[in-house]
Amino acid sequence: MTRPTPPTNATLDPEDWDATAELAHRMIDFAIAHLRDVRMRPVWQPMPDPIRAGFKTGLPEAPQPLDAVFEEMQARVFPWAMGNNHPRFWGWYMGAGCFTGALADFLAAIDGSNLGSGDTAASKVDEQVTDWLRQILGFPQGASGTLVNGGSMANLIGLTAARNAMAGTDLRKNGVADMPVPLRFYASDQVHACHLKAMNLLGLGSRAIRLAGTDMAYRMDVDALQAAIAADRAKGAKPACVIATAGTTNTGAIDPLPAIADLCRDEGLWLHIDGCVGALFAIAPENRDLVTGIERADSLALDLHKGLHAPFDVGCALLRDARLHRATFDESAEYLQLASRGIAAAEHLHRYSPETTRSFRALKLWMMIKHHGVETFGRILDRNIAQARHLTRLIVAEHELALLAPTASTIVCFRHDPGGMDEAALRAHNTEVMLRLQESGLAVLTDTTIRGQHCLRVAICNHRTRSEDLDLLVGEVLRIGKEITSTAADI
Ligand SMILES: *Cc1c(COP(=O)(O)O)cnc(C)c1O
C-alpha cells in the first residue's frame, strides 16, 4: 500500500479544526480523569518487556492520525509514569505537579513567546513572577532573578556570579587561567552533587570546594568552616564563597544561616544559599523561622517544581546585586540590539542567564500563584513538615524501626532493624524492603547513606499526602520487613 505524499504546501496546523477540537477535548477529559483518580492507581509499576521494546521501533516517516498517536500514548506511556503525582510518592525530592500548572504549560506553548528578548506580556509575566519570588524571600528591591529549568541550573548561576565577582580579574574576558590566586568554595559534607557539577563547568574543579563537617543534626559546623577558611588563607588560596544549604537532600537539615551569613560578612565572602528544598519554607506560617537569615544571601537557588508543585521544570536564581548578575552573563550581539520602539524595545531577559531562548515557564507560576494564593502553598508546606514529624513519632514508637537522623523539615530517614543484623545485612534487608514497596505499587520511597548507615528516606513534598498514607507506610514496612526475615529464616 502506498501512502499519498503530503501536499508540498502543508503546514503543521490541523486540516480540520473542528475534529481536532473534539480530540483535544477528549485529551483534556482523559487528563482530568487521570489526575482525579490518581489515588486509585499503583504509585509506580515495573515496565513489561514488550512495552520497553515498543520504544525501539523505527523512525515514523509517514504521517498518522493524531487520535491513533493519542491512543498509543495512553496505552504505552501513561501507565508507566514516575508516579510523583501520587499521594504516596516520597522518592528523591520531587513536587507532585498540579492541574492549574499543567493547563498553564499548555497555554504557554500556545502563546508561544520566547522570553529571551522582545517586548511581550509574557516577559512581563516572567518579571512579575521573579519579583514575587524576590519578595517572598525577603530580597531587597532591585535584586534580580531569573527562572531556569531547576535547582541545578539556579545554583550554577549563583556560583558563576560568585566566581566572577571574587576572581580578582575580569574573568569573563580573561578566563580562570588569569586568576591571581586559586578560589576556594565551602559547603558542608551534605551539599548537593550539582555543586560539584558546577565546579567542573566553572573550570575550578570539585577540589575547589572544601567540605566542612556537620553536627549531630547534619548542619554545617561553623567552627570547622571558619578553620577551613583560615587554613586556606594561610596557604595563599582565596576563600571566595560559602554554599549554605537550606534543606539538605539527605536529611532536610538547614545549615545555621545567620551564623554563616555573619561569618561571610566578617570574612568578605560571597554567600550562596541552596534553597531547593527549604527556601519556600519562608512562606509557611508555622515554619518560616526555620529559614531565618535566607534573605542575607548574595545568591539563592530555589526550586518551584519541588515546594510549589509546578509541573517540571522550573527553578529560580535570585541575586542581591542585579549589576553583578548582568555582568556575569550579558553579551551583546549586533542581532540582539535594543530598539527605542517596536518589538525589541524591552530589556533582554537573556542577559541574566546562560540561556538565550527562554521558555514561558513563568506562566504556570503566575497562574498557580494567582489561583491558589501564596497562603495555600505555605499551608501545604506546613502540613508536609507536620506529616514528617508525625511519621517520625510513629517510627520512634516502633521498636523494630530506627530513626537515623533528626527530622529537621520534610525528610525522614529510618530503617527496619529487627535486631541482630550488621550494617551490610541491614543494607541488604532495607534495600529489599524498599524494592518490594516500590514494586507493590503501594508507595515509593528511595534510600540514602548517612555517616555510613544505609537508610530508607521519605521525602514529603506532596500536596496529596494524608497522614493515613504515612500510617499505612509504617505498617507496610513492618509487614514486608517481617516477611523478608521469616522467609530468610525458613531457608
Ligand atoms: C533537588 C535539589 C537540587 C537540584 O535541583 P534540580 O531541580 O533537580 O536541578 C539542588 N540542591 C538541592 C538541595 C536539591 O534538593
Image: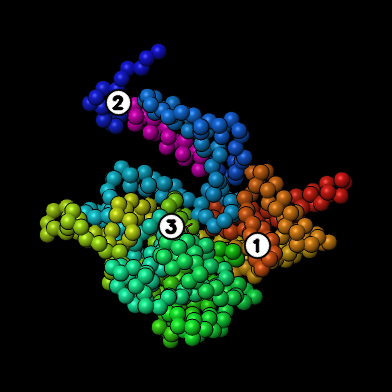
Q: Judge: label 2 CB < 8 Å from ligand 1.
A: no
The residue that mark 3 highlights is 150
Which numbered circle lies on residue 342?
Answer: none
Where residue 405 sits, quadrant-wise, is bottom right
Residue type, mark 1 in image: Thr
Compared across the picture, whether 480 is left or right of 321 comes to right
Residue at disc 3, CB closer than 8 Å to ligand 1? yes
Disc 3 and disc 2 in contact, CB within 8 angstroms? no
Q: Residue at x 29, y 54 (%)?
A: 356
The reply to whether dot 2 and dot 1 touch (C-beta < 8 Å) is no
Instruction: Look at the numbered disc 2 and give the secondary structure of its residue.
Output: loop
Residue 49 point in image, percent of width and height:
61, 33
Q: Which residues are magenta?
A: 18-36
Instruction: Check disc 3: other Cα within 10 Å, few if <14, some if 14-19, many if 20+.
Output: many
Q: CA distance from mark 3 to mark 2?
A: 38 Å
Residue sitting farthest toward the top = 1
Q: Residue at x 30, y 20 (%)?
A: 5
Q: Is residue 319 visible?
A: no
Work out how far the residue at label 1 is from the one at label 3, CA to CA, in angstroms: 24 Å
Of the residues under marks 3 and 2, which one precedes in the sequence? 2
**Is residue 193 something that shows in the picture?**
yes
Task: Check disc 1 and report the residue beneath it.
Answer: 449
Residue nearer the viewer, 81 or 211: 211
Q: Residue at x 72, y 50 (%)?
A: 432
Three-letter amino acid code at the position of disc 2: Asp
**Distance between the Cα atoms at labels 2 and 1?**
56 Å
Determine which residue is flagged by label 2.
16
Q: Is residue 381 above or below residue 242?
A: above
Q: Secondary structure at mark 1?
A: strand
